[in-house]
Image (cartoon, rainbow, N blue to C red):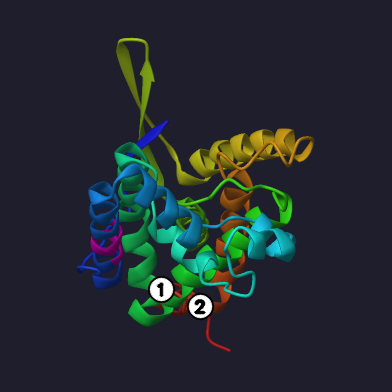
Amino acid sequence: MIPIRTDVQVYRRQPVVLMLLGVNILVFVYQATLGPREGFLLAVEWALVPRRYADPFWAVRVGLDPNDYRPLLTNIFLHGGWLHLIANMWTLWLFGRAVEERMGQLRFALFYLLSGVLASWAHMAVYAGSQVPALGASGAIAAVLGAHITLHPKSRVLLLIPIIIIPLILPVSTWAYAGVWFALQLLQGAGDLFTPDMGGGIAWWAHIGGFVAGLGLVRFLAPPDPRDLWRQPPI
């Protein structure tokens, strides 16, 4: 399922979303200039390697600082390929602007970064023994999707569903889209629970943790919709 449009109107440019898009693209361009060895070293140092924190003795032995928790944040600005980057940035653009418009710039920036860290913690909790560097903005963007459906529960999204050579374009409620997406993450994540040391290639539990974090944090960081306040009867 590829979301291509939502029916939520955004009336102003949202600078934090634009800044996040720019930073992620610039970081990826820098990654692309590195050779295989330099790229691997960058990923090991700045992406999230769960065993680095679960097994400090191993971390020290391989030259990593187990007391440096910056990768829980920095990993959300790294990507493993162009398709990974494009999919994440498109989803951020599609759903993030309406969330930033409701939250405001500072609160949305805090929401995005905090959600990314919480998603990283969720991944690290499940894949504690993994030595695979986890990277990507998917956890933070899952939080944006959770915030979007909370703030705009009646919104709809237009989906492109490629079926062999005949693309199907289908309008559905954003809740339905998010529900199917979340169910797929749970299904894949539940499978990884049985072999956590083998997992970590795709951060299913970062997606799950980010989505749940978004559902929770948005209630503290998003102000009420003025239109909802106007509709309330006088006390």
Identify the element where label 1 is drawn: helix
Bounds of the magenta segment: 20-24
Foreground pick, 232 / 150: 150
Q: Quadrant of residue 184?
A: top right
Q: Quadrant of residue 103?
A: bottom left
**Which is the main secondary structure of the residues drawn in magenta?**
helix
Left-right relation of 85 to 131? left
Residue 205 x, y percent position in the rendering: 64, 48
User: Could you tell me which residue is drawn at 69 percent across and 49 percent down?
Assistant: 127
Residue 201 x, y percent position in the rendering: 56, 39
Q: Is residue 79 magenta?
A: no
- From the image, which quarter does the C terminus lie in? bottom right
Foreground pick, 144 / 41: 41
At label 2, the amino acid type is Leu
Observer able to see residue 100: yes
Per the image, the residue denoted by label 1 is: 108
Q: Residue furthest right?
A: 194
- Asked if residue 66 is positioned above or below residue 211 in the image, the reply reads below
Identify the element where label 2 is drawn: helix
Q: Which mark is residue 221?
A: 2
Give the mark, 1 or 2, whose residue is nearer the N terminus: 1
Q: Residue furthest top?
A: 165
Q: Mark 1 near mark 2, Cβ–Cβ under 8 Å?
A: yes
User: Could you tell me which residue is drawn at 40 percent across and 78 percent down?
Assistant: 226
Q: Is residue 22 magenta?
A: yes
Residue 144 x, y percent position in the rendering: 46, 59
Left-right relation of 149 to 84? right
Left-right relation of 168 to 51? left
